[in-house]
Image (spheres, rainbow, N blue to C red):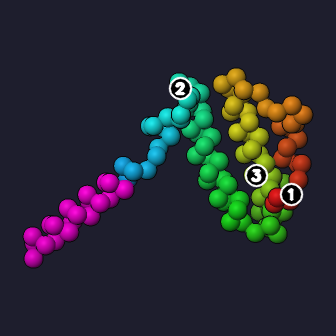
Amino acid sequence: MNRILSFCCLLALTVGSVCVAAQVNPYKDGTPGVTGHRSEVLALVIIQENEFTRLAEAMPADKYTWRPSAGVRSVAEVFLHVCAANYNMYTLVGVQPPAGLDLKAMEQSTSDKT
């Protein structure tokens, strides 16, 4: 019985480590064609973009105007705040935001999901 249990544990650890090794980690693996500090910033933005995009897609459109209390950002304002912050992160590595984009007014620009 102990041998079977030991074998099952060993098999589970082996399969688990293979699955973890197969995942791409932008922090460790870097980004194609980009090196140094730019690679670190780009990896951070890629990870955040993926997480926030999935969260934004999962949230119903009618909830974008919801805010927990008066004086607190709405859901749409939080997403737009993150977008502006990501544009600002690119400026750290020398990339300017698109012309005509007002990052300071971005939070108040819309509450529409699209």
Residue annotated with mark 3: 78
Q: Nearer the viewer, residue 105 or 33?
A: 33
Query: What kind of residue is marked 1?
Result: Ser
Label 2's element? loop
Label 2 neighbourhood size at 10 Å, few (<14), some (14-19), many (20+)?
few
The nearer-to-camera label among 2 and 1 is: 2
Where on the picture, by quarter, is residue 54? Answer: bottom right
Where residue 28 appears, x then y in whole percent?
44, 37
Q: Are marks 2 and 3 in contact (CB under 8 Å)?
A: no
Q: Are marks 2 and 1 in contact (CB under 8 Å)?
A: no
Query: What kind of residue is marked 3?
Result: Val
Label 1 neighbourhood size at 10 Å, few (<14), some (14-19), many (20+)?
some
Q: Residue at left 66%, top 25%?
A: 93
Q: Residue at left 53%, top 26%?
A: 35
Judged left or right of residue 15, residue 90 is right
Distance in Å between CA atoms under marks 2 and 1: 37 Å
Quarter holding the N terminus is bottom left
Please, is residue 33 above or below residue 80 in the view? above
Distance in Å between CA atoms under marks 3 and 1: 10 Å
Residue 70 visible somewhere in the drawing:
no
Q: Residue at left 20%, top 62%?
A: 10
What are the residue bounds of the magenta stretch? 1-19
Residue annotated with mark 2: 35
Where on the picture, by quarter, is residue 9? Answer: bottom left
Which tag, 3 or 1, sits closer to the chain's start? 3
